[in-house]
Image (cartoon, grey):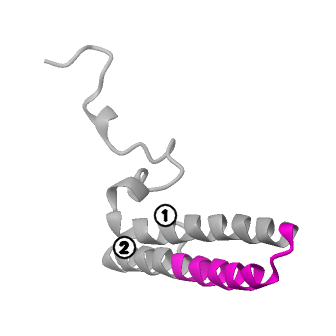
């Protein structure tokens, strides 16, 4: 028996108050995690590169900058391909404003 102030349709998806259609997708979809890890590693490599540059280690600056760019590009590619896969599964385009 339902309470008097609760309607049956109150438990449907609350699209008016959610920013994305799939809230929490980053935690549920583990295929995005390698991309997020690569982006985090790219940020760490950038920090290490700046530190190496501050101390005057030119060789490490070159290695760190290449690693940061490659890791960031790989992470971004993984995340975008996974989002494209999820959207294609739902019949949407990656640039669809209704998509996540």
Is residue 89 shown in magenta?
no
| Horizontal side of residue 58 vs 87, given as left or right | right
| Horizontal side of residue 66 vs 81, given as left or right | right
What whole-number distance in Å separates the C-alpha atoms at marks 2 and 1?
9 Å
Q: Quadrant of residue 34?
A: bottom left
Q: Main secondary structure of the magenta part?
A: helix
Is residue 62 shown in magenta?
yes
Residue positioned 34% across, 62% down in the render? 29
Name the spot of residue 21 as percent of width and height, x first.
44, 56
What are the residue bounds of the magenta stretch?
A: 55-75
Residue positioned 68% across, 84% down in the render? 63
**First along the sequence among labels 2 and 1:** 2
Residue extending furthest toward the top: 4
Work out whether 78 lies above or below 97: below
Residue positioned 62% across, 71% down in the render? 42
Badge 1 density bin: few <14, some 14–19, many ≥20, Cα 10 Å: some
Q: Which circle marks residue 86 in the picture?
A: 2
Work out whether 8 lies above or below 13: above
Q: Quadrant of residue 59?
A: bottom right
Considering depth in this image, is 3 or 42 the residue closer to the camera?
42
Residue positioned 31% across, 42% down in the render? 12
Res. 6 visible in picture: yes
Res. 95 visible in picture: no
The kind of secondary structure element at disc 1 is: loop
Badge 2 density bin: few <14, some 14–19, many ≥20, Cα 10 Å: some
Q: Which circle marks residue 100 in the picture?
A: 1
CB under 8 Å between discs 2 and 1: yes
| Horizontal side of residue 72 vs 100, given as left or right | right
The kind of secondary structure element at disc 2 is: helix
Considering depth in this image, is 14 or 73 the residue closer to the camera?
73
């Amino acid at each position: 028996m339902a309470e008097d102030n609760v309607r049956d349709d109150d438990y449907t998806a609350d699209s008016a108050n959610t920013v994305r259609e799939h809230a929490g997708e980053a935690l549920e979809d583990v295929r995005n995690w390698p991309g997020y890890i690569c982006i985090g590693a790219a940020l760490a490599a950038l920090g290490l590169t700046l530190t190496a540059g501050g101390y005057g280690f030119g060789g490490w600056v070159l290695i760190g900058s290449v690693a940061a760019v490659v890791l960031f590009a790989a992470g971004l590619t993984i995340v975008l391909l996974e989002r494209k896969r999820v959207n294609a599964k739902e019949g949407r385009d990656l640039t669809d404003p209704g998509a996540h």
